[in-house]
Every structure is written in C-alpha cells, then in structure tokens.
Amino acid sequence: MLLAAVVIVFAISSWSSNPSDSGKGQPGTDEVGQGQGDNVTKPIASEFYPWRDSYAQWLMAVFSIVATGVSMWAVGLVKGTLDETRLARDASERAIGEAQEANNISRAMAMLQLRAYLTVSECQHQALPDGYLLSVVIRNSGQTPAFGVRHQSESFASDYPNGGDRPTPDVGDTHSSITGPGESITCSRRLYVDNMNRTIDDLTNSRVGLWIHGKVVYTDCFGDNHWLTFRYVLRGQSSGTHLLFQMHADKTGNDTDRY
C-alpha cells in the first residue's frame, strides 16, 4: 500500500514537472515569440506547479492512512490480548475456587474422621432394697479427646409406654471434664420406690416403666460444639419361664449431631 502511494506521488510529480511539453511537436501549431510564450505558459504553470509544493503533504496523507491502519491493527491486537488475558484470569479464578472447595472438603472429611464422638455404649440397671440404680455409659468412639464434657440426667417412673414424654433435663453449669479416645463416662441415677414388690409386679406386666434420660455436651479438638441426648426405659419381659428386666432405647429422646 505504501509503495503504491509512493508510485502515484512520483507519477504526479513527473507529469506536472513539464506542463508545457504537451504542446510541443504537435502538427499545425504556430510558434510564438519569446515574450508571448512566457505569457501563455505562466497561467498553465500556475495551475500545475503547486503539485510540486504538495509532495510532503501527499506523503504525510499516505503515511497517515498507513498509520491509521497500523493503529487499527494494533488496537485489534491489544483487544485480542486483553480478551485472552481475561479468559486466562477467569480460568485461574475457577481453578482457585475449585482448589479451595477441594481443600474445604478435605478438611471437613479430616475433621469428621478425627473428631471426638460421644455415643451410648451400654445401659445398666441394678435392683436395690429400696429402688433401682439406672446407668447409661457414654463412650468416646472418636480419634481425639472430647473437651468440656458436661452432662445431666434424670430418672423417673411412669406409665408404660406413654410416660417417656418428659422434657430432657438441661445441662446447666455442671462440672466439665475431658474424655479421651476410648474413655467413658457414666450417667447414673438412683430411683427410689415405696414398694419394691408392687413395682416389680408393675414392671413385669408392663404397666410401669422406669426411665433415665439426659443430655451430654462437649467440644471437639477443632473447637466445634456437639451434643447428645439419650432416653432409656427399664421394663419386664418374659422369656419362656424366666422374667427379664431389660433397658431399651425410647425413640422419643435419643438424638445427636453426629453427622
């Protein structure tokens, strides 16, 4: 493009450099005197000679066009570069977000595997001359200690099976302890009765149940708080010729934030 513009400029320059040559050697033309010829060529020269003074302007115009094209190409190149940069940045941000999400999932899984879990491992009952001793053993089945362990329990006798709807006792400001992995705590309550023989008969015929229920709160090694509620009932159950007294879970009160 630049070469074509230069050729055009030089062609105009060559054509305008001899404006009076077009009349020489033509048949039928009359020669005029020196003075008269000058008077004739001056108006013609005044029309074409200014092209010689416009070389720089023509070159500048051509170069301006070329510069405009180059600028447009450069702008397009910069825009393309910015678009590629934006796409790369978006991809990087997505990769960072996915990596953070993967780290969060890995951390959550590690916490679930390593944290303390307090669960009911055993229920016990013991007949006494004036009542029963009911116990629930809470064991740490997790991999790390449970800190600030506090618990509160309560026992009561009530009609079976609809007597276990009493609210779970609040833990309150009870003594706290640390329960390591595999260690246990025992929540025990002694229930006094006025007439053991009548109570045994009521238990045998499933007219009365003896309940123990309570709540345990604790903090794991990651600083998260957890809780456990339990509710178990003692009642009589016949097994052939034998009478068994067993404790089983009352579904209305057993819950945990294990998961």
Image (cartoon, rainbow, N blue to C red):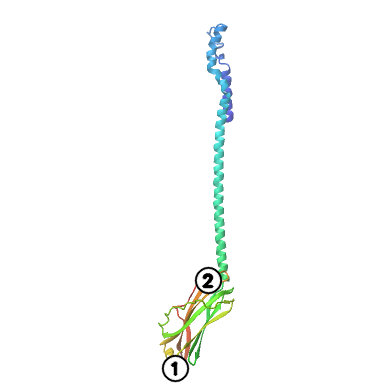
Q: Residues within 10 Å of mark 2 (few under 14, many from 20)?
A: some
Q: Residues within 10 Å of mark 1 (few under 14, many from 20)?
A: few
Label 2 sits on a secondary structure element that is: strand
Q: Where 139 falls versus 242 (above or below)?
A: above
Discs 1, 2 touching: Cβ within 8 Å: no
Q: Where 54 falls versus 193 (above or below)?
A: above
Question: Residue 190 versus residue 86: which sits nearer the camera?
Answer: 190
Give the alpha-carbon distance from disc 1 to disc 2, as whole Å: 44 Å
The disc, 1 or 2, on the residue closer to the chain's N-terminal end is: 1
Circle 1 residue: 197
Question: Residue 62 versus residue 198: which sits nearer the camera?
Answer: 198
Query: Which residue is at 55% across, 58% downward?
Result: 98
For this view, does 90 lie left or right of residue 157? right
Mark 2 belongs to which amino acid?
Asn
Residue 218, how many percent across, how many down?
54, 74
Residue furthest to the top in view is 33
Q: Where 154 falls versus 198 (above or below)?
A: above
Residue 208, how many percent across, how many down?
42, 87
Circle 2 residue: 225
Question: Residue 217 versus residue 112: which sits nearer the camera?
Answer: 217
